[in-house]
Amino acid sequence: MDALYREEILEHYKFPRNRGALQHPDITYKDTNPLCGDEVQIDLSIKENRVTDVKFQAKGCAISQAATSMLTDMIEGKTLDEIKQLGKKEILEALGIELGPVRLKCALLCLKVLKSGVYGIKEWPT
Amino acid sequence: MTFPTEKIRSDFPILKRKIGSKALVYLDNAASSQKPKQVIEAMDAFYQSSYANIHRGIYTIAEEATELYENARKSVARFLNAASESEIVFTRGTTEGINLVRFAWGRKNIEEGDEILLTEMEHHSNLVPWQLLAQEKGATLKFIPFDAQGRLQLDRLDSLLTPKTKLAACAFASNTFGTINPVEKIIAAAHAKGIPVLLDAAQAVPHFKIDLQKLDCDFLAFSSHKMLGPTGIGVLYGKKRHLEKMDPFLGGGEMIKKVEWDHATWNDIPWKFEAGTQSIAEAVGLHAAIQYLNHVELDKIFEHDQSLVRYCMERLPEIDGLTMYGPPAHERTGLIAFSIRDIHPHDIAAVLDRNGICVRAGHHCTQPLHRKLGLEATVRASFYLYNTKEEVDLLVDGLKDTVKLFRK
C-alpha cells in the first residue's frame, strides 16, 4: 500500500528481532534523537571479539524501530572490526527505501548507538 | 451565511498542487499559512515598479517605497485598532518581537530577584527569551499551570503576581491546545498591581479580531507568515510610553537621530527599533494580506475555522486509540492536537503525506507542555480560511489507513 512502509519494514516494526535487554552485557549504549524523542539502547555480548548475543530497546517511529531490529539481525556473529565497517549504506539497503533528511536521522540512530558502543565512546561529543 | 470557500481557494495558487496523484490538503496553518495571489502579486508588482530602499532616498521610487512601507504600518495599526501607528514596530517575526522586549525593555527593568510570570503553555519563543534574561539577571520564572483540558488555572493568578513580578508574558492562543486564553483577566489582574503584560499573539492575530485599545496589553507580538503574508516580517506592538522609555534594540542605520564618533542619539519611535534595511517588499505583502483578511472578514474566518475544528473533533473519536488534547471546540482556534496509541506521530504524518495531507508531528515547540502530558510528540491539524469539511474527511480517512497499517 505504501512505498515508505514496505512490508519488510512493517514486519520488523510489528515483530522486532532481538528486542529486550541482556542480563550482563559486555557493551551497552543508549542515545536519543532530540528532534522526535526516539530512543535506542543496544546491549551486546562479546566473545573473542565477536558478537554472540544482541538485544535492543527502542522507543520511537516505525522507521527507527525497524532499522534497529534489522541492524541487530545483521550483526550477530560479526566481529567488532566488521561492525566498525558498517555504514549508512548498509542500513538504507536493509530498509530498501529512500529517506529525506529528517527521517534519515530516525533510521541512523541505531547505527550511531551501535558504533558509539563498539568504539567505547562514553558520551557523544557535543 | 455561507462562507465563500471556493472563491477563496481559487485565490491560492498552491492549492492546485498535487502530491503524487493526490490533491494537496494543507492542514499545517498554525506553523505557517499559504499565500493568496493578491499577496504574491503585490510583492511582485512592488519589485517590478517601485523598489528602492526607504526613508532617505530623494527620488521618486524611493519616496514611493517609503510611502508603501509606512502605509503597511498604518494598515497594521488600523487592523488592530492601535492608538497610533508609532506603536507598531516591524520585526522579523514573533520571536524577534519578544526578544526585542527582552533586550530593550527587560534588561532595563528586570533585576536580580525579580519574577517573570509565564504560563505552562508557552511556545519556546515566549519561554526561552525569558529564560535567557532570567539567567542573565538572576531573576526567576513562574508559571500559570494548565488543567487537564488545556485551560489556564487562574484561581492561583493573584498569588502568582507578587510584589517581585515585573512582567507577565502569555500566549493569547495556544499553538498546541488551541485554547484562547482569558488574557483580559490576566491583564486586569496584572495591571491592578502595576505589572505590564506581553502577549504572544502569533496564533491569535491571524484568526480573530483584536482591539488593542480595548485589550490594553502593554506589548503584543505576531508574525506575518501565519496570516497569509510573507515570511521575514512581523510586528511588535508596544504602548507608546513603554517604547519611548526603552533602549534601542539593534544599533545601525535609520535607528539614529544624530551620530558622533563616540555616541549617538536615537530616532523617534517606532524607527528607533528598526535598524538596517527593513523587509520592505514583505511589508507590502503584509499590507496586502491584511486587505485580504479584511475583505473576507476575520469574524467569518473565525467562525469557519471553528466549524472545521468542531467537525474534526466530532469525527476523530472514530479512530481507534485516538486521544485529543485541549478544550472543547468553542474555546479554541481552529487547531487540534492528538495522538494515537502505539503509533508514533512521525509515522502518522508520513502516511498522511502519502495522501497529500500536510500535518505537523512533533513537539510543536512546546516541549515542557508535552512532557507534562507525558508525551514526546503529538500530531496537530490546523485549519484556515481555505480548508473544507471534505479535507477533514480526507484526514479522518488517512488516519484510518494509518491505524490499519500499523496496528500490531
Image (tube, coloured by chain):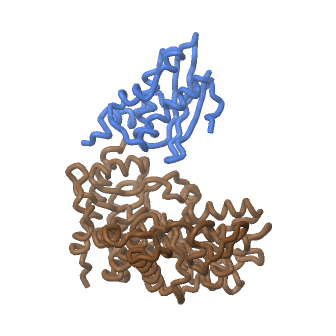
Chain colours: A blue, B brown
Q: Is residue B256 left or right of residue B319?
A: right
Whether residue B228 is visible, yes or no, is yes
Whether residue B144 is visible, yes or no, is no
Judging depth in this view, the residue of B154 and B5 nearest the camera is B5
Furthest residue to the right? B112
Q: Hey, which quadrant is residue A49 in on the image?
A: top right
> Is the residue A26 above or below the residue B200 in the image?
above
Percent from the top left, x then y, of residue A33?
A: 52, 42
Determine the residue positioned at 66% across, 67% down: B103
> Is the residue A89 above or below the residue B159 in the image?
above
Quarter of the image that includes the N terminus of chain B: bottom left
Furthest residue to the front? B58
Percent from the top left, x then y, of residue B41?
A: 29, 70
Judging depth in this view, the residue of A20 and B117 nearest the camera is B117
Q: Hey, which quadrant is residue B286 in on the image?
A: bottom left
Determine the residue positioned at 48% across, 20% down: A85
Percent from the top left, x then y, of residue B401?
A: 28, 50
Determine the residue positioned at 55% across, 78% down: B237
Judging depth in this view, the residue of B403 and B244 nearest the camera is B244
Determine the residue positioned at 29% across, 35% down: A7
Q: Is residue B194 left or right of residue B232?
A: right
Q: Is residue B55 left or right of residue B400?
A: right
Quarter of the image that includes the C terminus of chain B: top left
Percent from the top left, x then y, of residue A4?
A: 31, 40
